[in-house]
Image: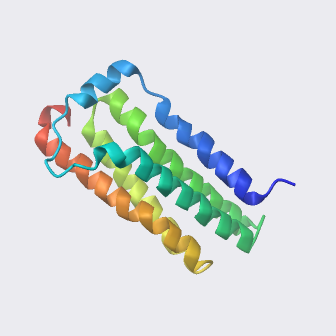
Amino acid sequence: MIESWMIIGGVTFLVAFGTLFFKLRDINWAVKLERPDWMFFEPAIPLIWTVIFACGAGSATFVWEHEPGSIKTWLLMALYLLLEVVTVAYIPTTLRAKSLKVGTMLGGAGEIVGAVLTLAVLPISQTAGLLLLPYVIWGAIGTYTTWEMIQLNPESA
């Protein structure tokens, strides 16, 4: 029998592949952008997001197991999916548009969805809510970093 965590993890893994929908020529634009001096953690970002997506999948599994198949649970699963899609859209959309403002808007949208989802699942499972905190914290850092990069690269806003 296929367990819920397998399905949730599989969907998370498949959606995460959306970050690969960019053209290599778009990377040249991003590489040339000036970054804040304090952005020493950039090489760790893929690992950080991998952990955050795993936490999100764990959170979704706790919520699903609480009341599997209910309308409320399906709506929350849709919110988890929306959060991941918005997050995954950041890289290819920002690169394709060559616009840090687009990235900041997507980051802000993800931050709002992440906060709403966290507040929605806390009454169901405190563990599920806590597992979303890395997203809420890191999403804010990423959104702020993108905004800060606009200040350093106004021509790429």
User: Would residue 87 be found to the left or right of residue 45 on screen?
Assistant: right
Give percent across and percent down for residue 96.
36, 27
User: Would residue 66 be found to the left or right of residue 97 on screen?
Assistant: right
Question: Which residue is nearer to you in this view: 5 or 146?
Answer: 5
Give percent across and percent down for residue 8.
68, 54
Question: Which residue is nearer to you in this view: 56 or 119?
Answer: 56
Question: Which residue is nearer to you in this view: 43 or 140?
Answer: 43
Q: Quadrant of the N terminus?
A: bottom right
Residue drawn at x 60%, y 48% is 12
Farthest top residue in view: 25
Seen in the picture, residue 43 relative to 99 is either above or below; the reply is below
Seen in the picture, residue 126 relative to 42 is either above or below; the reply is below
Instruction: Give the tally of numbered discs.
Output: 0
Q: How is the image coloured?
A: rainbow
Residue drawn at x 72%, y 51% is 7
Residue drawn at x 41%, y 21% is 23
Give percent across and percent down for residue 134.
43, 64
Is residue 35 in view from this perspective? yes
Q: Quadrant of the C terminus?
A: top left
